[in-house]
Structure formats: structure tokens, C-alpha cells
Amino acid sequence: MLVICAFQYYPLWGNVIAFQDYQPYLGVGKSLWNGVENFGVVVNGDPEFVNAVKNTLILTAIQTVIVFPAPIVVALVLHSLLSNRIRQFVQTVIYLPHFMSWVIVVAVFQQMLGGTGMINNWLRSHGYDPIHVIGNVDAFRALLTSQVMWKDTGWATILFLAVLSQIDRSLYEASAVDGAGRWRQTWHITLPGLKPIIILLLILKLGDSLTVGFEQIILQQQAVGVDASEVLDTYVYNNGILGGDWGVSAAVGLVKSVVALVLVLAANKLAHRLGEEGVYRG
């Protein structure tokens, strides 16, 4: 509780900066108050802010459609393996990238796909033209998505595998006696068993929908430029920490947090109407 209070609740006091012309050398106590002036970039549609929102929403949509189902598919494949030794080996291999920092992950992809990376060197040595992925604006979103999948898909399967292990095996045996094949068992037994955890994670994903890989993007932003890579988190960093516009950045961060809270509450209410518990019981 002390750690949570110190690192989660106490920093909330810093949100007052969103209503100030904050100057670091004056501090919160002596900086002048300017009401809601800092929220002008949100209300008036500042072009840089709008671009950050657009990129954030596009990346969120891509990762929700492609990245979110990936661990479900992997968990189903692992669950179907009969050999425990093979299953444990595959789990170990796909878990490992999760423990690497984004600095290492980005470096690995650069060594593989960069202009002088392993793949392009092989293509040149065999008389083929190199492929431009790192630094390519058109390929940037696909690159981010592939990095997230490689790093976190394996680790995300843990929850789904835990739920799958709790499904009563007698249901599969009874369905097999009734003539149900593997696909019908998956559709009528496995997926309904996963439904509660899928809905819960989707709700939590909505709360995190406006937060898209700050560290991952900031490490590669210089290669593709701000227009293609700016998201809300990097907007806050570039304008607040680097640009010194602390009040505006705090205002944008506060709006993002409020929107995320509203999305979680709305999604949780919808889950209750569908008969699910969601994040908390209705």
C-alpha cells in the first residue's frame, strides 16, 4: 500500500500543472494559474495534437484487431499439443522476448531489417535489391505491430492457458462421444470457457487504448519523423519535457486519462448488460 500510494496516488497531485503556467524553477506553489487555457490545444484542434490523436487511434485499432487475438490463437495451439515436453519448450522460447527491454528489441529488429542488417546483406550478396523497412514511413506501423507481437504474444498466453487448464475435461470427452470434432469442441467448449477473460482483457485494453508504446516509438521516432510516429505519449514528452510547455502537456495527459476512465466504465457497464462481471461486479 505504501508503494502504491507513493508511486500511483501521490503523483496525481501533479495534475494541477494542467491549470497553471507552470515554471519548474518556481514550482507548483508559485506558478501562476491560467484556468483552462492549457486545454486550448484539445478544444481548438491544434494540428500537432490532432496528428498525435490520429496516429494513436490508428495504432490502437491495428493492435486491437491483430495483436490482441494473437495470444488466444497461440494458447489454443499450445493447449492442443499432446506432448508436455514440446509444449514447455515452445512456451519457454516464446516467453523470452517479454523479458527484453525495448532498447534490445528495437536493436534486434534493426540488426535484422536495417539497411546493413542481416536480411539486406543476404539479399545484396545474392543479387537482389534490399528492402527498406527501418526508416520507411509506410512500413512503420507494420514494424511496430510486429515488434509488439514478437515481444509480448508469448507472455500474454499465460492467462489464457491458465483458464484453459480449468475447463472440465469431461466436457470434451462427452462431446467426443456425441461425435463432435476438434473444431466443434473449440467453438462450443473452449471459446465459451475463454469468454470471461477475453471480455475482461478487452475492457482493460480500452482503458489503455490511448497509451501506445511510448518507449518503443520514441526509440524509432527520429528515423521516420514526427508526422508518422507522434502519438499522445510522445506528444506529451516532446512538448513538455523537451519543449518546456509543461502546462499544455499536463492538460493533454489529464484529458487522456479521463477519456480512458470513461471508456473503462462504459465497457464495464456493457459487460454487465451482457451477463459478464467485467472488471468489477455490477
Image: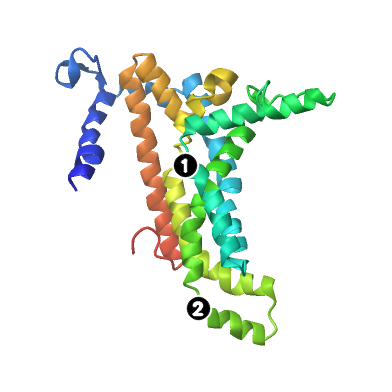
Q: Position of residue 214 (x, y in %)?
A: 45, 31
Estimate how packed mark 2 is, as few (under 14), some (14 to 19) or many (20 or more) residues with alpha carbons within 10 Å.
few
Residue 131 appears in the picture as rendered: no
> Which corner quadrant of the image does residue 243 belong to?
top left
Seen at 57% across and 37% down, the residue is 147
Which mark is in front, 2 or 1? 2
Residue 237 appears in the picture as rendered: yes
Work out whether residue 249 or residue 100 is closer to the camera in this orientation and state it: 100
Estimate how packed mark 1 is, as few (under 14), some (14 to 19) or many (20 or more) residues with alpha carbons within 10 Å.
many
CB-based contact (under 8 Å), mark 2 and mark 1? no
Q: Position of residue 102 (x, y in %)?
A: 48, 33
Q: Residue placed farthest to the right in the image? A: 127
Checking the image for residue 270, the label placed there is none
> Which corner quadrant of the image does residue 210 belong to?
top left
Left or right side of 9 for 153: right
Residue 267, compared with residue 236, is above or below; it is below
Residue assigned mark 2 = 168
Disc 2 to disc 1, C-alpha distance: 34 Å
Q: Position of residue 187 (x, y in %)?
A: 63, 70
Kind of residue sitting beneath label 1: Ser
Work out whether residue 81 or residue 144 is closer to the camera in this orientation and state it: 81
Residue assigned mark 1 = 209
Left or right side of 144 for 100: left
Label 1 residue SS: loop
